[in-house]
Amino acid sequence: MGAEATPDFSGYATKAGLKCSDGRTITPDAFKHQDKETVPLVWQHGHNEPSNVLGYATLEHREDGVYCYGFFNDTEQAKNARTLVQHGDIKSLSIYANQLTEKAKQVLHGFIRELSLVLSGANPGALIDNVTLAHADGELVTLDDEAIIYTGLELHHADGESSEETKEETKEEKTEEVAHSEENPTVQEVYDSMTPEQKDVVHYMVGAALDSMAEALTNEETGQTVRQSATSDDEESTSELAHKDDEEEGRRMSRNVFEQESEGKKEEHVLTHDAIRGIVEDAKRGGSLKEAVETYALKHGIDNIEVLFPDAKLVTETPEFDSRRVEWVSNVMNGTKHSPFSRIKSLVADITFDEARARGYIKGNFKKEEWFAVSKRTTTPSTVYKKQKLDRDDIVDITDFDIVMWLKAEMRLMLDEELARAVLIGDGRDVDDEDKIKDPAGASEGAGVRSILHDHDLYVTTISVDDSAPPPEVVDGIISAAQYYKGSGSPTFYTTLPVLTSLLLARDTLGHRLWKTPAELASEMGVSSIVTVEVMESEQDLLGIIVNMKDYTIGADKGGEVNFFDDFDIDYNQYKYLYETRISGALTKIRSAMVIKRAPVGSALVTPQQPDFDPETHTVTVKTTPGITYKNKETGATLTTASPVVLAEGDSLTVQANPDAGKYFANNADDEWTFQHRAA
């Protein structure tokens, strides 16, 4: 084939039987049908500009692969490439092939479409890199039948011997060449004598040298003079790096071009774009970028490899709050009734007395008036606030996110949680704590937010259940107490997650769950839903609260609703922030809530009995009940069966039953009674 033209270089385009790093192997006859065909010769597989086409290559099928002969054209780019090849700066080839047929990791057939010169060390070792296309919508599609195949073998110079010609050398020529090489060996001779490990080191050193030469050329273009120094044991001299003429047999190793300018200066490794590409490919195959980089570092001796990793990135725009679960807060605050007045007053008329009943009439008899008591309760507002401050220097220095907006969100979140907690169970602080949110509890008049847990018996019925009993019995006890609920519509059961979990884990004798979901349990209990409240876990004896929040009123005058204030303190260079509200809160419907409590451990259930009342003599007589003590609620005096109480005209008596030690009542709705001798 050399009769028509002399090739500028030659080398293996592909190597048969060479196992690639991804496990695939090219079979000997994969490209046999392209023997003697000509394909374009390009630079780095570039197709975006015509100047990337450097010439053509003729393919030659051999038993161990596809050999090629490269011919450069006369363009400036081709002349530059010819010089790079002759100087040994470019040593590697790769091919682009398509219509690949692959079976069991064996590439059986395909078409070589182009031959490309590539930078030395771009992809160490054999590699088949499939082509990936990017669609307009951003989707990446890998083409299984197209690939860039790199063998890792080096090409031969035109002025050197090809692999076939080497086989035909005479013994005399080899002897002469060896003798000549011993005196001053060529680069190719030294390279061929190396072990694979030594060649890997040379690949790395060539890459580093190319980077240094590129920097030198850049400095030369800007008008600067660049010189390299060579140091020996006998003398120190400064010389310029010069190449031999193209006709010379080969470059002689008169000095080490990889020496540093100073022996005392530590060699720095440059991570090139091609090296990064190889690392990424290794990471794709191995599944770990860190391991791929560490492997590269071990091969190339990079110290402090951790500095190459990118800085950690925030996965969220702002810091996450480590807070209690607050989903229940909106359920409570949005469910309450809101009044435009901060002073809440409720009136109650008790028409449960017999005197309030309608009466039958007999002609000629005197008609009696009905009688019932009317009482009122007043709740006035109290101030609740959340205050914070920030140094202005910190606000300016924190640039990753808006620290002020983040802090305002935290303040409002905590304020709402505290208000919702005060509504359900109180804020939990001691009575003498100056930070306590006022809770007038059962008082007829008071300022603050009345907690449902500690409210008066007229508004809240307390139920005691033995939670050590099987869950079905606990639920039965709650269902049985539903008769005392007189609130609006279907209420909500507010409880803790541990309580809900213990009920949902209940099983029948066959091992089936009694209630598979909270919704099933809620339907069984007669409530609309079950809401878990984490702050209720602080009340050890509390199982839950059943209430419809529309029966609870929160009042605030205009200007007393939740407001945000900020101010700048010039003296201390601080911004100060305040969330504040002035509100009142209370249940406004009697018997509109039920508090479910645990019965004292080891205690026994007892049931109080209503005292007898003789309307003729106006005498009240308590009954003797084991485990129960009856007292006069007004004076606290103990009442006994042997000492009945006679009411004078206009007097009244309220009898209260109290369980003895080790006893408890099922509820507090049937533990007191009022009797009156109404004036004629």
Image (cartoon, rainbow, N blue to C red):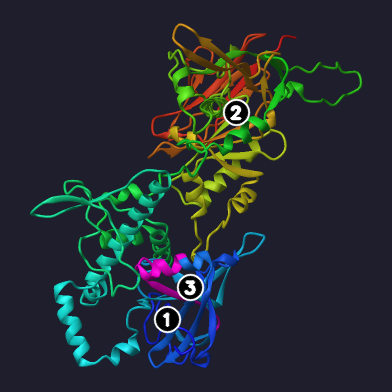
- Residues in magenta, as a range: 80-100
Q: Are marks 1 and 2 in contact (CB under 8 Å)?
A: no
Q: Which mark is residue 24?
A: 1
Q: How many marks?
A: 3
Q: Are marks 3 and 1 in contact (CB under 8 Å)?
A: no
**Residue drawn 59% across the image and 12% down it:** 446
Residue 428 visible in the current orientation? no
Q: CA distance from mark 3 to mark 2?
A: 87 Å
Q: Residue furthest left?
A: 234
Q: Residue furthest top?
A: 571
| In front: label 1 or label 2 | 1
Q: Secondary structure at mark 1?
A: loop
Residue 488 visible in the current orientation? yes
Residue named by callout 3: 116
In the rendered image, which quarter contains the C terminus? top right
Point out residue 670 in the picture as x, y percentages from the top left corner: 58, 30
Q: Secondary structure at mark 3?
A: strand
Instruction: Determine whether, in the image, residue 527 is placed left or right of residue 598.
Output: right
Identify whether 377 is placed above or below 33. above
Determine if the magenta segment contains residue 132. no
Point out residue 17 in the picture as x, y percentages from the top left corner: 37, 87
